[in-house]
Image: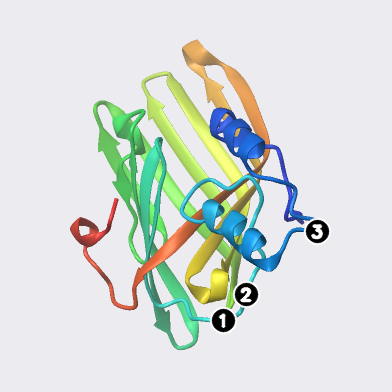
Amino acid sequence: MFRFRSTGLVRVLPVALVLAALLPNTGGAPAQERNTRQSLLFGRTAVEAPERSDAGEWPGTWYYVSRDRKMALWIRDRNGTPEVKLRMRGKMSEAENFSTDWNGKAEYESTGNVAKFELQFDERDADTMTGRWIWEVTRGDDGRRETAQFTVYRAGWGRQMVWVLENLRTESWGRREGVIEQPLMVWTFQKASRREALWEELPF
């Protein structure tokens, strides 16, 4: 299982280094200072995962934004089980732009790329979601496959959502053959609305 503190954020190392230099050690800091530090982590790829809270509820619209991507997660309740729909817009490649159905699955084509994305859930209840992240993109004889285990929970009095990816592995074949492994990545989402808001309404 993941621990709340981590330095394994390869993709966002420059941001992590800047934040690490700016944020003081809060071991003996006053409550106001600790809260200020924690608030810097929400809505970004976090240097450390915020503590979980069972306050709040899943249904509604959650969003995440960074310099590399924008994401929205819509969650609805179906007989006590949360169902999710994800939309991602990446800045690095058109292949990173997709939307899933309410089963967390997407199959799409973009600029010659053929891609499949899936969230395979192991657990979904009122406070926690766990499962596997699987994303494969191919173009002719070239391609990549990205896999990870994930845990999703709420934080910040129920107004934030923390998405933890563990053991993220990207395997490429063809002209760019190789493997990249990242032990931990953390995204923090803000809750935009209790309803299913439109993408265009989100404050990206």
Residue at point 33% right, 33% down? 91
- Nearer-the-camera pick, 128 or 134: 128
Q: Name the residue under label 2.
A: 53
Q: Which amino acid does label 1 sit on?
A: Ala
Cα separation, mark 3 vs mark 1, equals 26 Å
Q: Can residue 114 be seen in this view?
A: yes
* Marks 2 & 1, CB-CB < 8 Å contact: yes
Residue at point 38% right, 41% down? 69
User: Where does residue 194 sit, x and y in percent of width and height?
Assistant: 34, 78
Q: Mark 1 points at which residue?
A: 55
Q: What residue type is labelled 3?
A: Gly
Disc 1, SS:
loop
Residue at point 63% right, 24% down? 179
User: Where does residue 60 sit, x and y in percent of width and height?
Assistant: 36, 74
Residue at point 59% right, 39% down? 19
10 left or right of 44 in image: right
Residue placed furthest toward the right: 28
Q: Against 122, is 107 above or below?
A: above
- Nearer-the-camera pick, 113 or 150: 150
Q: What residue type is labelled 2?
A: Ser
Residue 74, quarter of the rendered image:
bottom left
Disc 2, SS:
loop
How dense is the environment of label 1, judged by Cα within 10 Å: few (below 14), some, or many (20 and up)?
few
Q: Mark 3 points at which residue?
A: 28
Cα separation, mark 2 vs mark 1, equals 5 Å
